[in-house]
Every structure is written in structure tokens, then in C-alpha cells.
């Protein structure tokens, strides 16, 4: 019995320090207000053709999700960044934030870092829109965040950009 007590105590202490799962949180503070009025770039026929040609060149035949640049400002620590928040055309409850590589889906617990299942994003030089291949909802969550709502959302992340 005396041997079991120290082992049990050690297991309890280790369990308090360790947590399971992944977390994409980091030291940089990001914040957006998804409830404010905003505008978004409107895709043209030429934009759609660009995505179709890209899919052909990459031999991609799956579903394409387009994200368009919005006027929603992004707060990074204490700096305001314009033109960094995109909204999905085909799935309007999804937003993508370029700095920090964060996907926000309305009415979910937290933003997440996408990139599962071959997920890839491509943008022309204008950066007015993004073509997304292998869009799979889900990824590594930012557990340091507030819930994703039509209003203010904040999270701690890292300085990572796909393009």
C-alpha cells in the first residue's frame, strides 16, 4: 500500500500539468468584429475562369470554395490591418484571416488553423479573392479564443501566412 500512494500522487500531479490535444494558440493577439457592416469584393467571370484554369493545371476536380476580401478590419495586437479578412462565397458562415492563418466559422466554439486533408489556398496577384481546394471544415483550434459569433471575436495565434 505504501508503494501505491507515491505512484498515485505522481500520476495526479502529472495529470494536472498535462493536457491532451492540439492547440494552435500563440502570443499574437488577433481580433475582428464579424457583426459590423462590411462590403466584399465581387467575383467576376474572369476571376472564376482563373480558378477553373488553376484547377485544370493542378489536376484538381473537387469542389472549389472562393473567399473574397472584405472591408472588415483586423486588429493585430494594437495595429489595425485592412484587407486581411476574407469571406467564403459558397459558405458565407466561414471567414479566413490571412495573418495568423485562421478560419472562423460562425456559431462555433473557437477559430481554427486550417490545413487538413490536402487543404490549399491560391490567390492571384491582386489578392482580391482566394480559391480554396480540398476545403475541409475543421483543423487545429485556437483554444485561447472567444466563441466565433456575429460580433467581436478574439484569439491568440502566431505570425503565419499562406501567401
Image (spheres, rainbow, N blue to C red):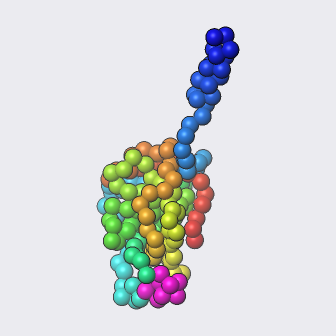
User: Residue 13: image x %, image y %?
Assistant: 62, 24
Q: Give the main secondary structure, helix, strand or loop, of the magenta stretch.
A: helix
Q: Nearer the viewer, residue 104 or 64?
A: 64
Which corner quadrant of the image does residue 91 belong to?
bottom left
User: Residue 74: image x %, image y %?
Assistant: 47, 58
Q: Tell me if residue 138 is in the magenta stretch.
A: no
Which quarter of the rendering shows the N terminus?
top right
Q: Nearer the viewer, residue 90 or 75?
A: 90
Image mark count: 0
Q: Which residues are magenta?
A: 50-60
User: Residue 93: image x %, image y %?
Assistant: 33, 61
Say whether residue 120 is left or right of residue 37. right
Q: In percent of the image, x 58 and y 28: which residue is there?
A: 16
Q: In percent of the image, x 45 and y 52: which residue is there?
A: 111
Is residue 28 shown to the viewer in this render?
A: yes
Q: In percent of the image, x 52 and y 69: which residue is there?
A: 118
Q: In percent of the image, x 51 and y 62: which residue is there?
A: 116
Most distant residue in the front direction = 1
Above or below, 121 relative to 31 = below
Which corner quadrant of the image does residue 51 belong to?
bottom left
Which corner quadrant of the image does residue 73 belong to?
bottom left
Which quarter of the rendering shows the C terminus?
bottom right
Above or below, 13 relative to 22 = above
Q: Tell me if residue 57 is in the magenta stretch.
A: yes
User: Residue 113: image x %, image y %?
Assistant: 51, 57
Is residue 81 shown to the viewer in this render?
A: no
Amino acid at each position: 500500500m505504501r508503494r501505491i500512494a507515491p505512484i498515485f500522487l505522481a500520476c495526479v500531479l502529472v495529470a494536472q500539468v498535462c493536457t491532451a490535444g492540439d492547440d494552435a494558440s500563440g502570443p499574437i493577439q488577433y481580433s475582428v468584429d464579424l457583426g459590423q457592416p462590411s462590403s466584399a469584393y465581387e467575383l467576376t467571370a474572369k476571376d472564376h475562369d482563373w480558378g477553373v484554369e488553376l484547377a485544370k493545371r493542378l489536376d484538381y476536380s473537387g469542389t472549389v470554395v472562393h473567399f473574397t476580401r472584405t472591408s472588415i478590419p483586423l486588429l493585430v495586437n494594437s495595429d489595425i490591418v485592412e484587407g486581411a479578412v476574407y469571406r467564403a462565397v459558397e459558405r458565407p458562415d466561414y471567414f479566413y484571416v490571412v495573418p495568423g492563418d485562421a478560419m472562423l466559422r460562425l456559431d462555433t466554439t473557437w477559430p481554427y488553423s486550417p490545413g487538413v486533408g490536402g487543404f490549399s489556398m491560391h490567390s492571384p496577384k491582386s489578392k482580391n479573392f482566394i480559391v480554396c481546394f480540398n476545403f475541409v471544415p475543421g483543423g487545429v483550434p485556437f483554444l485561447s479564443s472567444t466563441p466565433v459569433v456575429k460580433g467581436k471575436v478574439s484569439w491568440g495565434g502566431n505570425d503565419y501566412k499562406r501567401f
